Amino acid sequence: MRLLDRYLLKEVGGAFLFGLGVFTTLLMANHLFQFGRIVLIQGGTPALAVRLVLYKLPEALAYSLPMSILLGTLLALGRLSDRNEVAALRTGGISLVRIALPILAIGFLVSVATLALNEGVVPETERRFRKAFNEEFLKRPRITQEHVSFRDEVDGLESVFYVRRFRAEAGVMEGVLVNQLKDGSLRRVVEAQRARYAAGGWEMEDGMLYLVEPRGTVTTRFAHLRLNLRRTPEQIATPVKDPSEMTIRELRAALNMLRRSGQRVSRYILEINSKVAVPMAGFFFTLVAIPLGLRPHRSGTSIGLGLSIVVILAYYLLLSLTIALGQSDRLPPVVAAWLPNVVMGGLGAVLLGRASR
């Protein structure tokens, strides 16, 4: 059986690498064209164009890995089926499920690799791409940040800050929430429409102060409140991160901060689940590809590529629909993220069951 596993891994692995080259090239083609224009027409340097290409490559790989295992499985099993090798194995008493196991293992490993790439590499390369494109090519650094959170000590209290919008150049925070704790217990909550940096501190404007005492909470409205936060706007400023640039850990931290401030969190729950569900598509693509690849006359590269495109389009169209429904709160965020995988998994299981008869 180990010989069979090695043989299947070799067949699928070779076709997978071919697919990886094809899909990565297709995904990078538009970037290569755009970055070529930067050099030839818009006055960018070749070194900048090369860096921008390299920064975009991990993202392209993250998309092409699941597609490549789909194409690789279709091509490899199509060839084996046309050479009657699958029929010979089944005649020898080896079930289709047993044949599928090492291929499914490859699909699972590809999904894990995609998740690791999305978590460990893509956020950083996306951040560097945006920074280089905005600051080195457009000469327009981004100075407005949204959903900024940080911790500091203010007046002997551990203070957790959440800022809806931060304009570093103006020294202004908007939509400010501060939870202040001592020995792990909440002591004060400060909410303000805005805060301005002045004279080495921050002036909170138009807000509410909540003092948490044993007998209850004392509420005070204020027009101005001095907060002895010694951080300057430059010290608070951090590189702007879009959700695509954030890891699951960072998204969870933002989610917890939003929950404490009583704001809607469904968008972040959807984003967290999507960052796991989409990489796992490689496994479900493999499950669908195994029975499709065993059908007669499916060994041609063009036919395999065509089938791959059909499956990929169906998956991403369904994903776009469910994500849109999740963002509009018409579907629970967990369901919106995972439903396409459930559909693909169910389809693959049905097709595999029929092929096993």
Image (cartoon, helix red, strand yellow):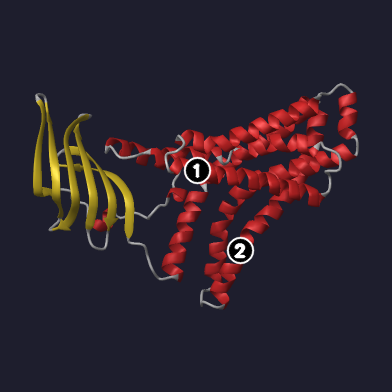
Identified at 68% across, 33% down, the residue is 347
Look at the image and tell me in which quarter the C terminus lies: top right
Which one is in front, 256 or 57? 256
Which one is in front, 72 or 343? 343
**Left or right, 319 with reference to 15:** left
Q: Height in image: 129 above or below 303?
A: below
Which residue is denoted by mark 2 in the rendering?
30
Identified at 65% across, 30% down, the residue is 346
**Left or right, 161 with reference to 226:** right
Residue 131: image x %, image y %? 43, 61
**Number of numbered discs present?**
2
Residue 112: image x %, image y %? 59, 37
Q: Height in image: 43 above or below 203?
A: below
Q: Height in image: 81 above or below 193?
A: above
**Left or right, 213 with reference to 234:** left
Residue 216, visible in the rendered structure: yes
Quarter of the image holding residue 51? bottom right
Quarter of the image holding residue 214? top left
Residue 345: image x %, image y %? 64, 32
Quarter of the image holding residue 311? top right
Q: Which mark is residue 163?
A: none
- Asked whether disc 2 touches disc 1, contact meaning CB atoms under 8 Å apart, the reply is no
Identified at 86% across, 43% down, the residue is 297
Identified at 90% across, 35% down, the residue is 84
Mark 2: few, some, or many residues within 10 Å (few <14, many ≥20)? few
SS under mark 2: helix
- Residue type pointed to by label 1: Ile
- Residue type pointed to by label 2: Asn
Q: Which mark is residue 323?
A: 1
In the rendered structure, which disc, 2 or 1, sits on the residue that comes first in sequence?
2
Mark 1: few, some, or many residues within 10 Å (few <14, many ≥20)? many
SS under mark 1: helix
